[in-house]
Amino acid sequence: MVEEKDLALLVDLYELTMAQAYWAESMNDTAVFSLFFRKLPPHRNFMLACGQQHIAHIIESLRFSQEHIDRLRRLDRFDNDFLDWLRRFRFTGSIHALSEGTPVFPQEPLLEIEAPIAEAQLLETLVMNYVHLETVLASKAARLTLAANGKPVIDFGTRRMHGTDAAYRGIRAFRMGGLSGTSNVLAGLDFDLPIRGTMAHSFVQACGDEMAAFRTYARLYPGTTLLVDTYDTERAVADIIDWLKAEPEVDIGAIRLDSGDMAEMAIRCRRMLDDAGLTQIRILASGGLDEYRIDDYRRNDVPLDGFGVGTAVGVSNDAPTLELAYKLTEYAGKPRMKNSPGKQSYPGRKQVYRRQDADGRYLGDHITHREEAADGTPLLVPTMRAGRAIVDAIRPLAEAAEYCRDAVAALPPAQRALEDAEPYPVVISDRLRDLQSHTLQQVRPHPPASDQ
Amino acid sequence: MVEEKDLALLVDLYELTMAQAYWAESMNDTAVFSLFFRKLPPHRNFMLACGQQHIAHIIESLRFSQEHIDRLRRLDRFDNDFLDWLRRFRFTGSIHALSEGTPVFPQEPLLEIEAPIAEAQLLETLVMNYVHLETVLASKAARLTLAANGKPVIDFGTRRMHGTDAAYRGIRAFRMGGLSGTSNVLAGLDFDLPIRGTMAHSFVQACGDEMAAFRTYARLYPGTTLLVDTYDTERAVADIIDWLKAEPEVDIGAIRLDSGDMAEMAIRCRRMLDDAGLTQIRILASGGLDEYRIDDYRRNDVPLDGFGVGTAVGVSNDAPTLELAYKLTEYAGKPRMKNSPGKQSYPGRKQVYRRQDADGRYLGDHITHREEAADGTPLLVPTMRAGRAIVDAIRPLAEAAEYCRDAVAALPPAQRALEDAEPYPVVISDRLRDLQSHTLQQVRPHPPASDQ
């Protein structure tokens, strides 16, 4: 697996060839790169910006070791003097970023990096890989949290998440998005998210006798959850009821359904348990759940008390990617942009202002030039300066998750719904629009080919 | 990020609580767990088994450190004697597995693990996380390779792959699936896959003058690829032609299109280049490509010579997960299975026999009990014994990738097509079917509830 010391090489080759070209041409001026997306993925009404904390850490510590340099030398593409420059590489630039957990919309920078151009270019691949994963997964988690409407949603996704890094940083993103717990021991410990787990079917099968399996778990883990669908769900629940009638001191917290028609089975099991006076035993569901099914259970008052979600949240299955772009918007003090069909962007450094009503609800955003004033709260704040993280600017995870919860609650109802909504109001300032048309004229050094 | 030394804790909590329960109940008998899937993901006619090499390595080296033990102790769920057992944990079991790169179909084990049950249970999460990622990504890569029909497909996906582990092990899987190169420097170096890259739009924008950008690259990187769509593609190509007429010694290998109607633009650019006698300059495409678009270009004879693919291959965007299951099929010498609705499986240790015609083409598979004989080649081979990898049983990557290429070529044409095919013929042996119905009767300790 990749070790942190090798992250500097986890980079697209062209970052290195471009860096060498800047170096060869003595292009050392300050560049501004903006990380943003042009449109929301399918089924998303907002995204949650996430990943700032990890980004600050990896940027501060990114180094090309002598071993890296030796490996690059063997590629026969790099000049020795440039490799010496790489060996001494330290990021010296600054970053403005949205606070982690901020809802973000198309064209709004998640972060802007300002640095000598070669330095900023070298960060592209890693910054995107880090922010992309955490933003995509936090945003999916937020939808599940909204659908569950206060009931706990537990992440069971580790086995189908894409590799170990996703199954670690992703769980942090799930906490940001409001999930209540995870099955992942390491990530739960490191990110202080409650660690949850029940039993697998294999345990019941190995014990052979289902009731023997249940008794063992109840003895070892008071308040445990029993998995009841290995052979015959209603039979298992009836057996549990008989058992608890005979031994009322046994402490069972919940039963878990993992297959079949869970709505119907939950209703039946709830009735059986309630009729036996076991109203305190909760019913949890898992197995192929996503926000739509959870929302459906809620609308139909299905008596389910919590949800274990695996695949859907683990890879954000309906929208596993976000078309994040890392674009040059300024170099040597001059605005820059490209003119590729369908890929225009706005040049210059930016700020995003978010307006709220008297109750704190979000009314809409204004994307401006960094130096413009506008109504509302400026969302991009300095998080790195001269290559060092501004520690106070990056909220601790617990605080960020709380901020995120409040921010999602402050979104308009249409954005909080699962169904596709009309876009959240985002206005581009006149100054940015003027800068765009002005820059567009400048970047056409020739008249169009068809005029010749 | 996760370090290899901490992988033992990257586990679902229930693996640990079940292991403790087995330990507490002195259940030390040998279990057989089978890793398989019940159905193919959407748009897949086969999957490529991948991940064996990494699995063997992590299983051999998996250890609970004293620090892990101390952290687990604080969860207040584990007995000190059990934690001592964990501290001494070494995998002592054996594994039978498909060779890496083997096409695999529903119900066929990708691997079977035999070990004292607690040991085998503890491996579940990691084995699935590892095999899932590599199998999903290798399978997607194979579709792109098939669509490109001999033309090179280069992975540009690192920025949108899910974290750093995916963006490393995933590139190995891409090599297995037949991709020709990657932009990822570290993975390209470690997995000996050609490393490719051109320039980004930001380079052209920073230089301001597009031709200055092209000249710099041509000087530094003879045979380079020039990105021509930053401002106006045809204008850029016309400028390149003028330049090469004036300086015919300049060595340009290719141009890259990254936006717009690529088919139309490729035809126009090809004509311009050919008319200028520059037939040796290739045209590469990137930007939102997937196997369907590449196949479409092929069917329409669009003059594109290679493809850079990012998002689609990076997360296997149309099928980012596979419903891999890790199921107990035997314990203490007795077959085991569950009876959850829609989730039945076949008990017992298994073998898969693949029949081929005289030309080596695959005719169909036979899933049998491990001890049964059948026609064809047995595909599950021992890869670990007594906790140690059988080194000769795991092919080196280059050899595995070659085997994989031949195996994909040996599939029936329907399986190699991009469109959904009739299932590949897989027959379950009578003995396994009998074992299933026999076990089904045994695992019902009570008559169904409705009979009482």
Image (spheres, coloured by chain):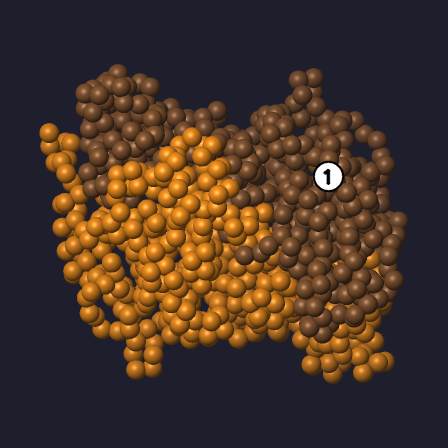
Chain colours: A orange, B brown
Q: Nearer the viewer, residue B43 or B199?
A: B199
Q: What is the x, y in percent for residue B68?
A: 68, 63
Q: Residue at left 27%, top 26%?
A: B269
Q: Nearer the viewer, residue B98 or B219?
A: B219
**Image side of residue B169 versus residue B292, left or right:** right
- At mark 1, the secondary structure is strand
Establish if A393 lies above or below A437.
below
Identify the image quadrant of residue B220. top left
Q: Residue at left 70%, top 60%?
A: B65
Identify the image quadrant of residue A435. bottom left
Establish if B193 lies above or below B130.
above
Q: What is the x, y in percent for residue A369?
A: 21, 61
The C terminus of chain A lies in which quarter of the figure? top left
Instruction: Look at mark 1 in the image and give the residue it sits on.
Output: B97
Q: Residue at left 22%, top 21%?
A: B247
Q: What is the x, y in percent for residue B107?
A: 71, 42
* Dot 1 amino acid type: Ala
Classed neighbour count for the residue bearing mark 1: other residues with Cα under 10 Å, few (<14), some (14–19), many (≥20): many
Residue B197 visible within the image: yes
Residue B160 visible within the image: no
Q: Nearer the viewer, residue B230 or B439?
A: B230
Q: What is the x, y in percent for residue A374?
A: 21, 70
**Image side of residue B308 versus residue B145, left or right:** left
Q: Residue at left 20%, top 25%?
A: B243
Q: Nearer the viewer, residue B368 or A89?
A: A89
Establish if B62 lies above or below A218.
above
Establish if A299 lies above or below A132.
below
